[in-house]
Image (cartoon, helix red, strand yellow):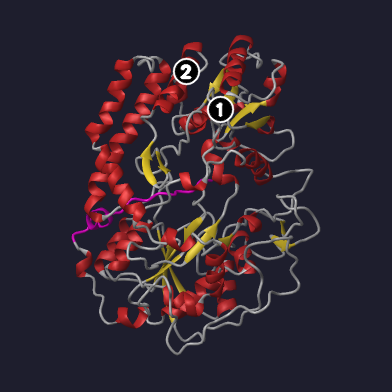
Amino acid sequence: MTSEFFTPKVTRRDVLRGSAVGLGALALGPALAACSGEAADPASPQGVEDVPKIELGEPRPDVTYPDGYVGPRAHDRAPFGDGTTTFRVVVPQDATTVGDWTTNKTSIEMERRTGLKVEYVPVLVRGTDGSIDMTKINAMLASGDLPDAFLGIPFTTAQLSLYGQQGVFVALDDLIETYAPMTRQAMSEYPDLRGLKAGTDNKLYTMLGVNDCYHCRSSNNRAWVSQTYLDDIGASMPQTTEELREVLLEFKNSNPSGKSGFMPFASSESTPIDTYFMNAFTYNPGGNQLGGWLSLDGGAVKFVANTPEWREGLRYLHQLGQDGTLTRATFTMKDTELQQNGNKGLVGFTRSYWWGSFFNPVALDMDAPWRDYVAVPPLQGPGGVQYTGWNYYGYATDGLQITSTCADPGKLVQWADYQMDLEATMWSYAGVQDDNWTFDPSGEGINGKTSLFSNKLFPAPTGQSWSQYAVMYRTSDFRLGEKVDASAPTFEAGLYEAGQGYEAFAEPQEMQLPPLIISDADSAAVADTATAINSAVKTALAEFALGDRDPSSDADWQSYTDQFSAMGMDAYLQSHQAAYDTRPQ
């Protein structure tokens, strides 16, 4: 439910670890020049010489759109493939959702729409624990035995930049200018999109995608409280740090659950608490960047976790620790333990991403216990600070990368662009039209506007959808156009409502450091420093909160801040500053 929005530059050693063959050994050959269609200035693509530019016609009149709608529309687009060439495309193996890619209903529908024949080559890239294993992909790249394209493979932007400049992936700017009107529309409606995915040479080596999840923009900063327990102690929703402290103390003293083991404040080891609490003292982007805790101040890259404001935040957490409402379990509890405690009604307040973080299962029954938990708004600190971290850049996704062995990259660019049509988008995500979903303007969408579509059966049965592996154009308006059943509201509706309560406190966009690619020369040192920073900040946060260190002690604070200089903080910031100043636009 969250989006990664920072990826470090990787070296050859990093991306080819475990392989003895370097990128220089790849057989690039003359096919690269024939396929690339590179422009002299990729920021102003010229298109493909002597090929007419494809434009979208008028949208189909049978689909009704909400007022002010921004996003994909349904068009009648003729097939462009003639069936004489089959393109080999490597895809993720997904037996649960996609099933057999060849017989998948969306695969069949995409061939009908485009006329393009595709041989899908499934490769396992994700373990059962959710970890990414790119071993087979890296081996394929290193051996030179390349498919025509990769679809839905989780390359980082840094990897795409590296491989593109090595000639493995095709530069796509001119091809998009000629063959991809939906992609051009997306770049127009999301002006930052191209720059977020371009390589360090300012060229695109991936088809662009959008998955603009409104509630995800604040998910790393949300907290929840039981409305029933609040009512039981006679408290209103806390608005300030001091009011929350009073609520937690009352939870501890009165135990409104009436059950043994009740926790006034619960969280799990995988959920950072600083992203919620520290934003009452200073804008805190959190540790979900490489090394993390980096922001912008007038265009200058700044580390926030060693400032006087951060120290004040630590004093507040220390106070909660002294109260006995924030305990060691906050930093050590496993995710499954937190869910078990939620199921038992033992959680008062929690810093969690969503209800599924502290309940399992989360059924849609109207009397399901998770519905009792409401989002706690960003707290105002004693100095009047009241931010929430708002992810301005997490919407940008990749979809398709075309390799240098492709004999006709223009066809695959069109294939990717067709996936962004509204009807194709619905097929790829929700499966068979009319069986699983239908266009439906008869009700109200999640955002309160006229609905765009309704789901009859979601998620789609195995073998019908492509999940989220397609080249997506799922804008916020599109996602929020899902028809709401007031008698059984979905998670999305509740999360949208929660997000609305946070957006008003979003940090200005100019304070958020966008995704960056660190230069090859600096990448190893930056990665090492980032690892050290992550460990130091997380360890100290727990120690200061639990009383193992005292944030009011000058000696303890000095010891904490001095370690960052020893880690090479100056060089670390300089590397990020250089990457920011030279980022693609």
Q: What residue type is disc 1 on?
A: Gly
Residue 144: x and y, percent?
A: 26, 70
Is residue 3 part of the magenta span, yes or no? yes
Is residue 575 part of the magenta span, yes or no? no
325 vs 100: above or below: above
Q: Main secondary structure of the magenta part?
A: loop
Q: Kindly indicate the quadrant of the structure image that contains residue 285.
A: top left
Residue 5: x and y, percent?
A: 44, 49
Residue at image x 29%, y 71%?
167
Write down the residue under mark 2.
Answer: 327
Is there CB contact under 8 Å for labels 1 and 2? no
Q: Of 138 and 42, which appears nearest the observer?
A: 42
Q: What residue type is disc 2 on?
A: Thr
Task: Quote the CA–CA distance across marks 1 and 2.
Answer: 27 Å
Q: Is residue 117 among the parts visible in the rendering?
A: no
Q: Kindly indicate the quadrant of the structure image that contains residue 36.
A: bottom left
Write down the residue under mark 1.
Answer: 384
View extreme (top): residue: 253
Q: Is residue 449 among the parts visible in the rendering?
A: yes
Could you say whether the residue bearing mark 2 is in a helix, strand or loop?
loop
Start and end of the magenta stretch? 1-20
151 vs 578: above or below: below
* Comes first in the chain, label 1 or label 2: 2
Rendered image: mark on residue 413:
none
Q: Is residue 395 left or right of residue 163?
A: right
Residue 296: x and y, percent?
A: 42, 44
Residue at image x 64%, y 62%?
70
